[in-house]
Amino acid sequence: MTATDQQERSRRGVTAHAEGLAKRQPLVTPPFALAWLVNFCQYLAFYILVTTMALYAVKQFAASDAASGLASSAFVVGATVARVFAGYLVDTFGQRRTLVVSLLVVVLACGFYLPAGSLPLLIAVRMLHGIGYAFASTATMALAQSAIPPERRAEGTGYFALGSTLATAIGPAVGLMIVNDFDYGVLFWTSLGTAIVGLLFGVLLHRYTRQPIPDAAPAPAASAKQGFSLRNIAHPAVVPIGTFMLIVGLCYAGVITYLNAYSQERGLVVGASMFFLAYAAAMFVMRFVLGKLQDRRGDNVVVYLGLVSFAIALAVLAFATQDWQVVLAGALTGLGYGTLMPASQAIAVRLVPSHQLGTGISTLLLLVDAGVGLGPVFLGFLVSSWGYGSMFALLAILVVAAALFYHLAHGRKEVARVVGVS
């Protein structure tokens, strides 16, 4: 054996050893677990209220349909506006500081639900809650991503997303149960208690992350002094994948906005009542597989699976005549949209430097919120002209168009096919 061969074998041995150490890096660390709990509490406090606010506005303040809808959607309005500045402020003032302050705002907002004695005050409280939630979710996700080993980025992001999945399944049911068995006062106290628990976890997370992560690249010294600009609103590297998710989010908006009315028109109420349970179950099970697959095989295999599943789900809704078909569509939506959201988050995080995590994350979430928020505005005209079946069929075609956009924007890149960790 020549000296060159010996050097090559030694180099390969060192590389294999390094890769082995990397694979053994733990994923569930105290910072990651605390960030998961904070995220779960934030989503749970939101979903406990989301299904009851419109009816509360009608009963308590005799609000019209439009005003009650505003009372419900004011949260989204506040969150969307806050997303514009969230990334910049998280990166400028620090993830930990922003997290604690925003969690305090959420607690304050949840406390104000109780004394809010008029519809305008309720709308203002909903907006304040949305603003605090947007900053808290951005900071929490940035802290969680900082704790995830780079070679397990998609796997960790998928596990982190399970918090919101569980809240989606639990929150609305808890909110409706409280309103039916007790009253809105108990509902608001429950939401406030959940927010306070989230704040306590946030304080612990603040303490656990006092020291910088050893492997993190230091931020440029001048970055904190840069003024606010368009680049701070939308990071150029994340805009393509964010635009892709805007299209996908618009399609998802058609599901969450019109599923109830669609099921009543077709006599599929039982199936619709189990739709999101099937959604959460499918996403929960597949998260233990797809995140690892994305880390090992690249983004494309997971994203295209999600797109195919989502397109089929919409097609099933377009032609569904039985309850089991709606339940099947729910499971496929969980495998589809429920897969695409954490997969795109993992992609966005890899596209930005560590000191711009907040901006990268907020860019993606801002565009997703835009798709989900603006979707009903356009789809309402479609439903009134063509009906629910035609709308879902058109959305299935739009998902196929989103697949083409993804291929052009990200899918044909080498990093989308094979993930390399430096």
Image (spheres, rainbow, N blue to C red):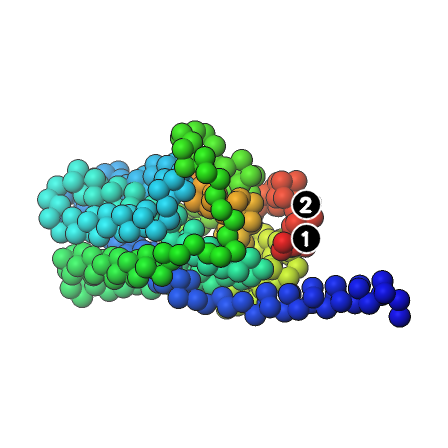
The relative height of residue 155 versus residue 55 in the rendered view (above or below) is below
Q: Is 332 on the left-hand or right-hand side of 358?
A: right
Residue type indicated by callout 1: Arg
Foreground residue among 336 and 269: 336
> In the figure, residue 85 lies in which quadrant?
top left
Number of numbered markers: 2
Label annotation for residue 417: 1
Label annotation for residue 413: 2
Q: Residue 55, position in %: x, y?
A: 22, 50
For marks 2 and 1, give the CA distance: 7 Å
- Which residue of the protein is positioned furthest toward the front in this rendering? 3
Foreground residue among 386 and 400: 400
Label annotation for residue 35: none
Visible in this render: residue 352? Answer: yes
Q: Helix, strand or loop at disc 2?
A: loop
Say which quadrant the N terminus sits in: bottom right
The relative height of residue 375 versus residue 149 in the rendered view (above or below) is above
Visible in this render: residue 40? Answer: no
Q: Is 22 on the left-hand or right-hand side of 70?
A: right
Q: Residue at x 40, y 30 (%)?
A: 228
